[in-house]
Image (spheres, coloured by chain):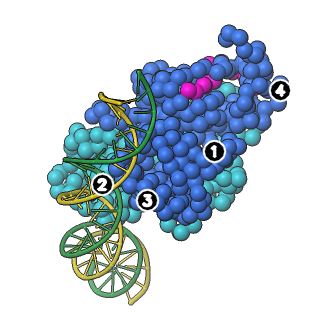
Chain colours: A blue, B cyan, C yellow, D green
DNA sequence: CGGGTTCTTGAACCAGCTCAATATGAGTGG
DNA sequence: CCACTCATATTGAGCTGGTTCAAGAACCCG
């Protein structure tokens, strides 16, 4: 829409084309992908992609920025269920066709969408989309292991290790994690209280394993950090 | 294989046909499904379906019995990551094409397999398979919320509620949960110690919310149980 | 430079973990 | 069918670490 490359060639000029659903597709397949994809919807920081109760018929692919998903139960308690980086497909769990989760941009972000109505694209394209969703499910599986770690330190170390790995896969510096989310969000994601997380972060800064301010975490001793998250093997 | 209905009509005579990937498919589509499916591999109790490190190229669909998946880290610590009922697709997470998890039958069980090499089946069939996998991912999502519950009681209540819902979907009595897995397995699945779980179970038996022996859990007060797992909304 | 949110730090409490002993039950063999 | 055995489950006591409640500090925003 508006002034941008033609739909057919959008992906070819996208800076995340090697890390998203388009990765590994041939030029012909990219054109095929374009049949089912809408490109580059922009989101401002703190803008919702969708809310619990919305009917979500499309898959969202993160193009830039970072998003978080969260769940609110009947008591009004909020639980952060995931953070999504470029290339990730935002998992969409529903009941009765309506989303259970809220998804919000943490930073200025952009997303592309695919819709699964009609089989307009080739098998290869569907496989690529499925493969992306599988990768996110894999991340969720690892997070399940992190949530079972007993100590707050192990959980936070697991968070750092996993974010580091995900950044590495994106070709970014794996030892520099930008954290547009709040400490409260990270704590919720890890099933900890804000205070417990804060103490752990302080201790790990003290011991020189990490450096951290509000918006970033720097990994100073990667091996030590990995050793602190033994549950991830 | 051996003496059983012909491949094409296996599903039509299967007792889980309404709760598995075959649910909602037309007779023609069932024949289509048969092209990519192998039927009814049997497993004895405690027999592995596959182990960590195995190359798993097929999707396993539980036909009868119950299976568990577990992960072993480098410290040799075991973590139970899921239980699978008839109709479930066993999630297969891998690294370098090799499974990260072990999957073992808890009871005498049987599984069917689909392989995704070649697009021999119709789009509808692939959608059905994808939908099944999505359902299991949904269960895993709910479990994530359960793992964040602070108290042992809330976690165990969450386990019961979720198992109850899954059984209900299978058309079984939602208030009668058979538990072929050990207490240790359940505790591991919930991120608790065996002792903590045992105490919670005793307390809930005492208060008349559930009845339980080694192999079964009976839900006596469903509303109370639900109230004990507020994190699932 | 305020004003308010976010984060850090402290102290006390309590739930779950650990270690330990006992009890129950399933499986086996006489 | 019963007795024995071993794995599994229960119960108890004390301890550790995370939560809770509370106060103060740092930071971003306008």
In space, the residues marked 1 and 2 are separated at their CA atoms by 34 Å
Disc 3 to disc 4: CB gap under 8 Å: no
Residue at which label 4 appears: A27
Position above or below: B134 against B228: above
Inspect this view and state whether residue B18 appears. no
Q: What chain is tagged by disc 2?
A: B
Q: Position of residue B19 (x, y in %)?
A: 49, 36
Front-lying residue, A201 or B105: A201
Q: Secondary structure at mark 2?
A: helix
Residue drawn at (70%, 53%) of the image:
B96
Q: Secondary structure at mark 4?
A: helix
Residue drawn at (77%, 25%) of the image:
A13
Residue at which label 1 appears: A167
Residues marked 3 and 4, same chain: yes
Q: What is the magenta range?
A: A108-122
Q: Secondary structure at mark 3?
A: helix
Front-lying residue, A129 or B67: A129
Pointer 3 local density, CA inside 10 Å: few below 14, some 14–19, many at least 20: some
Q: What chain is tagged by disc 3?
A: A
Residue at which label 3 appears: A203
Residue at which label 2 appears: B152
Position above or below: A54 against B232: above
Inspect this view and state whether residue A152 appears. yes
Task: Give the side of residue C13 with respect to residue B215, left or right.
Answer: left
> Where, quadrant-wise, is the C terminus of chain B in this rendering?
top left
Q: What chain is tagged by disc 4?
A: A
Q: Position of residue A137 (x, y in %)?
A: 56, 42
């Amino acid at each position: 829409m508006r002034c941008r490359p033609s739909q057919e060639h959008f992906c070819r000029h996208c800076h995340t084309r090697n890390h998203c659903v388009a990765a590994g597709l041939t030029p012909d397949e990219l054109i095929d992908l374009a049949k089912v994809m809408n490109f580059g919807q922009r989101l401002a920081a703190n803008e919702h992609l969708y809310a619990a109760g919305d009917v979500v018929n499309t898959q969202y692919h993160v193009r830039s920025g970072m998003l978080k998903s969260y769940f609110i139960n009947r008591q009004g308690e909020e639980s952060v269920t995931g953070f999504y980086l470029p290339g990730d497909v935002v998992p969409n769990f529903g009941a009765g066709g309506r989303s259970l989760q809220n998804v919000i941009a943490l930073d200025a972000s952009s997303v592309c969408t695919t819709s699964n109505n009609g089989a307009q694209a080739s098998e290869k394209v569907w496989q690529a989309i499925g493969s992306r969703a599988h990768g996110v499910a894999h991340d969720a599986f690892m997070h399940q292991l992190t949530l079972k770690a007993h100590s707050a330190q192990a959980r936070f170390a697991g968070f750092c290790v996993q974010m580091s790995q995900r950044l590495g896969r994106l070709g970014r510096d794996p030892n520099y994690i930008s954290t547009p989310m709040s400490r409260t969000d990270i704590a919720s994601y890890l099933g900890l209280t804000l205070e417990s997380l804060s103490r752990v972060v302080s201790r790990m800064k003290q011991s020189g394993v990490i450096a951290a301010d509000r918006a970033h975490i720097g990994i100073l001793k990667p091996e030590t950090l990995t050793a602190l998250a033994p549950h991830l093997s």
